[in-house]
Amino acid sequence: MVTGDFWVLLAMLLYFIVVVLIGFVYAKKSNASSEAYFLGGRGLGPWLTALSAEASDMSGWLLMGLPGVAYFTGASDAMWTAIGLAIGTYLNWKFVAKRLRKYSEVANNSITVPDFFSNRFHDDKHILMTLAAIIILLFFSIYTGSCFVTCGKLFSTLFGWDYATMMVIGAIIVFLYTFVGGYLSVCTTDLIQGTLMFFALATVFIGSVAQAGGVENTVAFLQDIPGYLSGTQIATPILDAATRWATRSSRTARRCSASRARTASLPSCRASCGASATSACLRCSCAS
């Protein structure tokens, strides 16, 4: 592991330790009552609530999925997705959130949305509660699973670790601080995550534009890609021979075993990978 990878790994390890510790810090307070565990005692401020909600909503897909779509197919899909989410989020907070906050207390101090529907409409047979619970379980299982996929792909891409293993470890960490600390720990960790996401996105955007030579150069470069900045077209990436070779080389390099260490010479790479070695820059790249 090179020095850069070590510091990245150390930062992630410290982050995991911090979020788990947050869960244990709030464990006693959260377990005082069901309301404290599931709703934080209804005492969270607007900033913490907003950052928690948006960090949960705009999670792995915002940092990895949406930029990947924009990079590969142009700004159209990403732009309309962002516009739709912005409008939907505003309408949700404007017309639903405040009313739900008030009526949930009136409706027998409902803690969950299924509980609210059941109490609000006097559903003695709990049909609404069951339907709402099934819908939430179905769609949030898919969404939560996609977040765990993001964790697995992140570590697999950065360090070459096993994708499935890292996905399971990430899930265990999330479940640990959630079950131990309840809603208070979730909101606090979401506050940290939301802040990190904001500064990370801002840093990447500013750094990318600066690296490209400024705003004008960036826009000019994107305009040269057919359909990239169009709001109605899907850009199709065109790979030249060098790009296709680089993509293939990247894929085959990941298949090389860990024992095939970094090297700076083709002969030593061939000694490790065999006669099929195709390149030896800093890492062996074995031909498939």
Image: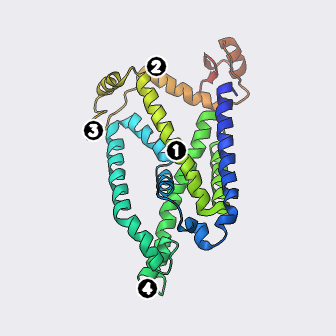
Q: Which mark is residue 242?
A: 2
Assess disc 2: are there few (<14), some (14-19) or many (≥20) residues with their C-alpha within 10 Å of its C-alpha.
Answer: few
> Closer to the observer: label 2 or label 1?
1
Q: Amino acid at mark 2?
A: Ala
- Residue 238 position in % (x across, y down): 37, 27
Label 3: which residue?
Answer: 233
Assess disc 3: are there few (<14), some (14-19) or many (≥20) residues with their C-alpha within 10 Å of its C-alpha.
Answer: some
* Secondary element type, mark 1: helix
Q: Amino acid at mark 4?
A: His
> Closer to the observer: label 2 or label 4?
4
> Closer to the observer: label 2 or label 3?
3
Give me the residue at 55% from left, 52% from top.
190
* Disc 1 and disc 3 in contact, CB within 8 angstroms: no
* Secondary element type, mark 3: loop
Q: Quadrant of residue 215?
A: top left
Measured in 3D between alpha carbons, the distance from the residue under mark 1 to the one under mark 3, in whole angstroms, is 33 Å
Q: Earlier in the sequence, mark 2 or mark 3?
A: 3
Q: Earlier in the sequence, mark 1 or mark 3?
A: 1
Q: Which mark is residue 209?
A: none
State the quadrant of the C terminus: top right
Measured in 3D between alpha carbons, the distance from the residue under mark 2 to the one under mark 4, in whole angstroms, is 66 Å
Q: Which mark is residue 122?
A: 4
